[in-house]
Amino acid sequence: MLDLQHITKVYNAGKATEVAAVWDVTLHLEPASYTVLVGANGSGKSTLLSLIAGNTYVDKGSIRLHNKEIQRLPDYRRSRWVARVFQNPLLGTAASLTVLDNFRMASLRGSPKWMKLGMDRAFVQAVRDKIATLGMGLEDKLAQPMGTLSGGQRQALTLLMTVMTDVDVLLLDEPSAALDPRSARQVMEIADRIISENKLTALLVTHNISEALRYGTRLIQMENGRIVRDYDQKAKSKLDQTEVISWFDYY
Ligand SMILES: Nc1ncnc2c1ncn2[C@@H]1O[C@H](COP(=O)(O)OP(=O)(O)OP(=O)(O)O)[C@@H](O)[C@H]1O
């Protein structure tokens, strides 16, 4: 489904500040699989997500989605298939636009620039029904500017907006890290439901070990730009927090 073959990304090549952020990574993600990616700060996790989303380009290697090479496509072209949710709830939405306008924009993602979508009653009702599934009462706030909502509310809506179009791949870059524990749990449960209901291929980056163990069907660790551990569902289910924390204990 999503196939990374020997991908490498070096920042500031040839300068004193040169960093091999991702080095010769080969990774195959099965359709409708949920993979969790852990690793120390600076190990290359966000860069890997950026390379998949097209926010930055590989120096070497190929990225194939449904057997088509996508590594040279810009992010806005890949957004038809790939959605990314960031740690900062402010990044996923337009603060000054209403909740409804944000959903309208999300449903145009990947469409040609000239395309517009009307706000007919059926669309408003469909958005209201979708938001109601979150069980957070946000369906009554359609006319409210997104910026007036809490971080947890925005992050929940951002997740829902990713599936307004037919994306296949969901990249979650520490989506709960800026939230209080209750909102964090709520957002992670919503993500889990959206991934399974929409049969998405998901990749979650987290520093939260209990999250890494609770969610997903595969656990990968990166270190210095490389994948150093890869546990399938069975092996992952036997792991505990102490063992995963020990992976970070290099000294
Ligand atoms: N735009 C950039 N320019 C130069 N170096 C960068 C850039 N982005 C990342 N790096 C470097 O690449 C390496 C990997 O960074 P990356 O953000 O991918 O790691 P990470 O595992 O996501 O870290 P964290 O857990 O802290 O978010 C780091 O050494 C970082 O300083």
Image: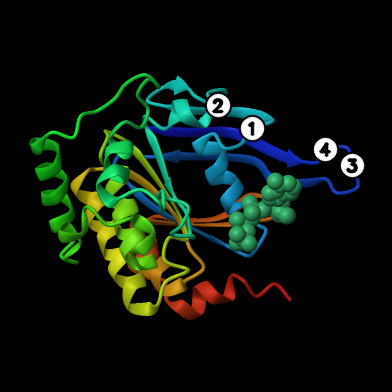
Q: Residue at x 45, y 78 (%)?
A: 241
Q: Give the crowd class for mark 2: few <14, some 14-19, many >=20 residues within 10 Å.
A: many
In the image, 146 versus 129, the foreground residue is 146
Assess whether mark 1 and mark 2 are in contact (beta carbons under 8 angstroms): yes
Residue 226: x %, y % from top left: 64, 49
Assess whether mark 3 and mark 4 are in contact (beta carbons under 8 angstroms): yes
Q: Give the crowd class for mark 4: few <14, some 14-19, many >=20 residues within 10 Å.
A: few
Judging by the rendered image, the residue that carries numbered circle 4 is: 13
Judging by the rendered image, the residue that carries numbered circle 2 is: 71
Residue type of the residue flagged with mark 3? Lys
Q: Earlier in the sequence, mark 4 or mark 2?
A: 4
Helix, strand or loop at mark 2: loop
Residue 57: x %, y % from top left: 62, 32
Helix, strand or loop at mark 1: loop
Residue 161 lies left or right of residue 94; in this view the side is left
Q: Residue at x 37, y 25 (%)?
A: 66
In the image, 105 versus 247, the foreground residue is 105
Q: Is residue 80 above or below residue 11?
A: above
Residues under labels 4 and 3: Cα distance?
6 Å
